[in-house]
Image: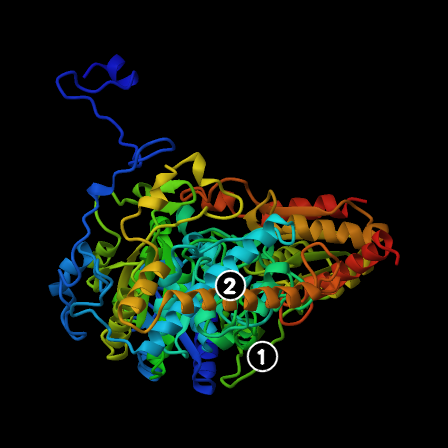
Amino acid sequence: MKRDDMEAGKGAANRPPLSLHVPEPHFRPGDKVDYSYLKIPEPDAIPRPDETAEAGGMHALAYGLIRVLDDGNRAVGSWNPRLDPDTLLLMLRKMALIRAFDDRMFRAQRQGKTSFYVKSTGEEAVSIGAALALDREDMCFPSYRQPGILIARDYPIERMMNQIYSNRLDPLMGRQLPIMYSAKSHGFFTISGNLTTQYPQAVGWAMASASKGDTRIAAAWCGEGSTSEGDFHNGLTFAAVYNAPCIFNVVNNQYAISSFSGFAGSERTTFAARAIGYGIPGLRVDGNDILAVYAATRWAADRARLNLGPSLIELFTYRAEAHSTSDDPSAYRSAQEREEWPLGDPITRLKRHCIAEGIWDAERQEAMDLEVAREVQAAQKEAERNGILGHGLHQPDQTMFQDVFEKLPWHLKEQCAQAIHERKLKWPE
Amino acid sequence: MTMVQAINSALRVMMARDDRIVVLGEDVGYFGGVFRVTAGLQAEFGKQRCFDTPISECGIIGAAIGMAAYGLRPVPEIQFADYIYPGLDQIISEAARIRYRSAGDFICPMTVRVPFGGGIFGGQTHSQSPESLFTHISGIKTVVPSTPRDAKGLLIAAIEDNDPVIFMEPKRCYNGPFNGKYDQPARSWADHPDADVDEEYFRIPLGKAKIVREGDECTILTYGTMVHVAGQVLEDRGINGELIDLRTLLPLDIEAIEASVRKTGRCLIIHEATRTSGFGAELSALVQERCFYHLEAPIERVTGFDTPYPHSLEWAYFPGPIRIGEALDRLMQD
């Protein structure tokens, strides 16, 4: 090659020029949606292996789609968890509650009562299904779109609202973004804004449980976009090496803010298939089918409890709403996408199943929706009595300095005195 | 005891006292670590308490955070401070914030041990002093021992602390106190008073500096390897300086600093880390803010240069007796 060509960035003339691939989603605003490229297999296309089976023999699970509810709203196949009517109706109620909660809190944000909110609309089955399949004592290391874990574990919704409002009864003392809950009492690890940092932490918790001969397991959640983070792979490496009793959930809701899943590598393979390189089971699950979510989680949990180590579950779902209150999806995706998502809406699907089973009907659904809405409304009223963001009913200024360390060191004592002094000058009353 | 033996003794004493203490890191198990600091711990306490990890600082620290959240007291080792960067997000955004962001719901009692500093021909990736990265972060404590006795007592206090601690071990001092004379063989700890270390449990509280030698002509604020170098320079030049080993950089013993500088009126700050935005800048600002009217000369700083640590020019980089001596001359001028 000539030196001039090299400096000009030109390679050998007889080779084809290289080109960079930048992924592009199937649809953009104004495009007509056609989901025919998605392969949606029938339930039981890949039967449920025994929990004790070798991970190497179940690679097909990472490329298929585990489903239980068929197109006729029946629960079928070997993955059917055969839940009793009470559990099905509990799932329905919990999902309805989180949706009502989301709607109410979204509106509160628009009314300026808080700074920020993240809805989990369309993904309710992901967290409710998993939480109900786990034991209450198991520790969850969630991302920010799994409030359903708290809802499933009966955490008081009024307390969640106090946190969203950063008011004087906020259990996190006004320090965290809304929705970034923490509840050790409910097995819910404090949420980080940095993505997937919870993965190695969940593994460490699970390793500790195993090393102490405990029976509790850990579960972690992250989005498909953040599987690109090093922490994801570091966590999986550790879990595989030490056979940690941990379930990794990748919520593939198709979007990382405005970037479609292609920027996390979805054009090449599935996210469940990430597990194969680590030698652990990878299950790809219809995330809008709560029975499938429940069954897969239960399978992975039973496996972990048998000391057979970690599993990875990809929950194939769709983020029906914006990433957050600071996002506008109409600017980057087709308006039809949500309407035509072939795996439907998780609440509608379970409702239809319950009706098909003869344990539910439209009237009871309507009554339940009303009841849930009233419950949320009443909680909101109570929470707002304790203050909303910027209202003055917040934690005292000195609490800003508490919990940085167990005890206040001299430099924080000095800065705390300054904050108290400034408050007196700013607001003399 | 050497510093390596003293740290090993601290870990052994604490692991025997408290079965929540777990030691993890690259090569720390069967082999006992590249510096042999964890030698024998796996044989004595078993693989559940002391084990090797994958080469993943993010994984090591992240897992330790999870273990701490479970209720254990992990003591992860990062093989060289230069390797801590892949684990920094777990330290800065996670370990340091967990107590705060959860309002005490979860805590992170973890002690990250990191050998740091130069003087061993480690080149630019085995010689760095990143302490100011940690002191800049709210929520973590940073401890730097300079002698075997301090290393044991401070490490025990760090392990017992309910906050995350970065425990920085000056590896040039692992096997002997370095006096800065690079053309002479390494000294042994044998004749050093602080090498007489109790085999049993004892603790040295965090946040308390040590006056290594009393004096009234000037104050030297330093830590780690540079404590020994500074002591040698004072001795060689016959200066009656007060030498303060800070021992804990955060929380800092501001009382000891203030009392000394007010007494001597002159202040020299020495560290091995690069100069710009180094911990010396913080010390200098604090002394200026609190002792300005007692100062008789401008505060002096002796530091490493603002370059990566060079391999073959290591001793040209190192802030040794000449750089310190010239700074002392300027400080003592009038």
Asked whether B308 or A251 is in front, the reply is: A251
The disc label shown at residue A84, or none: none
Q: What is the residue that sits farthest to the front in this orientation?
A: A363
Residue corresponding to mark 1: B203
Q: Check the picture and name the quadrant holding the C terminus of chain B.
A: top right
Chain letter belonging to callout 1: B
Above or below for A144 versus B310: below
Q: Which residue is mark 2?
A: B95
Q: Give whichever of A290, A324 is nearer the camera.
A: A290
Seen at 67% across and 67% down, the residue is A402
**B120 with respect to A24 (left or right):** right
Which numbered disc, 2 or 1, marks the residue closer to the eye? 2
Identified by mark 2, the residue type is: Ala
Left or right placement of residue A6 versus residue B34 in this view: left
Q: Nearer the viewer, residue A356 or B116?
A: A356
Question: Residue A299: x and y, percent?
Answer: 24, 72
Q: Chain of mark 2?
A: B
Q: Residue at x 47, y 81 (%)?
A: B14
Badge 2 crowding class, 10 Å Cα cut-off, few under 14, some 14 to 19, many 20 or more, is: many
Seen from the viewer's position, the closer of residues A141 and B234 is A141
Please determine whether, in this image, residue B215 is positioned above or below residue A50: above
Give the amino acid type for the residue marked by disc 1 in the picture: Arg
Label 2 – label 1 distance at C-alpha = 24 Å
2 or 1: tag closer to the N-terminus: 2
Number of numbered tags placed on the structure image: 2
Badge 1 marks a residue whose secondary structure is loop
Q: Is residue A33 left or right of residue B210?
A: left
Q: Position of residue A144 (x, y in %)?
A: 46, 58
Residue B23 in percent (x, y) is at 40, 73
Task: Report whether residue A185 is seen.
Answer: yes
